[in-house]
Image: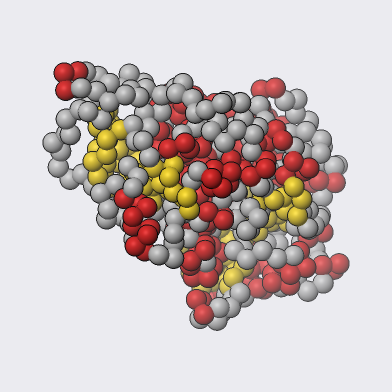
Amino acid sequence: MKLDILAVLGASLFSHALAASPSTAGLQSTECVSSSDSSDNLFSVKSEVKYSKLFSIDYHDTYKIVNNLSTNNTYALYQCGSTKPDIKNIDAFIPIPVSSAAAWSTSAAMFIEALGVQDRVKNLGTAPSIVSACLQELLEDVIKPFDEGNSTSTDEQEQSSAVVFSMPGGEDTNTTNTVVSTEYLEPSALGRSEWIKFFAVFFNAEERANTAFDSIESNYDCFTKKAGEEYDDLRPVVAWTSYAGPTEYNNNTAYWQISFADYKYDLVRDAGARMLNTTGAQATMFSTAAAFLDALEEVDIVIDESFVSYSYDELLKNYGVKDPSKSTYSWVTASRVFRPDRLQSTAGGLDWFEAPVAFADALLQDVIGVAHPKFVKDGYQPIWFRNLADNEPVVVVTASNCTDMYAQRKDPAESCSSLTFQEANPDDEDYEGVDENKTEDLIYDISKSEVINENDSDTSDGAFFGVNALQTTVAAALIALCAAM
């Protein structure tokens, strides 16, 4: 069952400040310089990286050096009209502010919209997967989708933009205007959202990026503080799980997985909950459903991230729960099984790959809403998570939900400081089966004979968060990776 977004979440989620045309407020050095003033300090507003581990920015009088630390790529951005800097070991020299841009991943497109510079975008990848209402509207008349079935046409489209934001391993990464972004690989939620500063330097939009991120950071910290105060002694155990059925890509062998990615740790702890974990691994694959279920024995909430969507009955079957009426698992008896697929495009693209990366505070708010349903407010409905056990519907976002296609994307989070939070009540049905007075993560000691492998690096999250950028061409090949998130 699918419902229109306005009927379910209301227009406020996608509301924007009305603007007749793209605004230049919050942009610096919007004009090219002449040779006579090209030695001046042109960037009075700078962005400082606080949380992100995978990029850095260095400012000079007329140019900026941007490093992607995860891919060892370095880019020199110099003010248009100034002298191109004489620097070695640079992957791309790009005059700024860029007048045109293209993006392959949906998360990169979201950061561009969060900066309010989507009027510069000429091409986007995997257009049917984009959930943003205003990007969908722009794709109807203004932005052209990449012609992904025609490499010659795609090459021409890429060369027509001043910069192309790509992903590691993309075929376009050797072109002179390609910039690789890896926001989805950051180990913290705030670190992911801070990539707005990475994208901002190409548009001289540091002021916008700083303002947006400072607001996200403040709101995130407020939610963390409030959740910690209210739920210190009542913390449900959360497990991030997935199932991959037998396919040619996994040797026709099904497996079950629990993810322990660092950013999920942050979110669960900051939401006033506990994380299911194994000893020292980022993710663990199980070879049997029995071993997988044994790991979930003391879990209160399951967040299923399986690549292929399915019903609650199908999930229970895939997980090996034969008779839910006789189940002793708290997440089954209390109907606490969620999927992060509530917001979708008509083609089934998930907003989970877009807005949550850019808006860490809204993502934390959602995790709190899953762990403590009445914390934000009575009847709170998460933005991205839906309760699969309660058969909650997905919500389809269309271009008709956009009110101003050139405005900066609004943070969908509530203002934490303006909310009155409810106290925890252990007798509430929301906490059925939850152990009181336990605050540490639940550590499960794995039987090695039942484990396929343990991943010490967070490679799976990159696959899951980047899948919208690839899903129309290599979706099947990513099933195993997506399950590992």
* Looking at the image, residue 401 lies above or below residue 173: above
Residue found farthest to the front: 141
Instruction: From the top left corner, tell me how far across and down residue 163 is, in percent.
Output: 34, 44
* Looking at the image, residue 396 lies above or below residue 251: above
- Horizontal side of 280 relative to 169 (left or right) equals right
Instruction: From the top left corner, tell me how far across and down residue 368 is, in percent.
Output: 68, 40
* Quarter location, residue 35: top left
Instruction: From the top left corner, tell me how far across and down residue 425 is, in percent.
Output: 82, 37
Q: Report the number of numbered marks.
A: 0
Q: Residue at x 60, y 48 (%)?
A: 131
* Looking at the image, residue 457 lies above or below residue 200: below
Q: Quadrant of the N terminus?
A: bottom right
Q: Residue at x 77, y 43 (%)?
A: 8
* Quarter location, residue 222: top right
Instruction: From the top left corner, tell me how far across and down residue 23 is, in percent.
Output: 49, 25
Q: Residue at x 44, y 59 (%)?
A: 147
| Residue 303 in sight here | no
Q: Nearer the viewer, residue 174 or 363?
A: 174
Q: Nearer the viewer, residue 187 or 25?
A: 25
- Horizontal side of 441 relative to 203 (left or right) equals right
- Horizontal side of 222 relative to 323 (left or right) equals left
Q: Residue at x 70, y 33 (%)?
A: 12
Name the colour scheme.
secondary structure
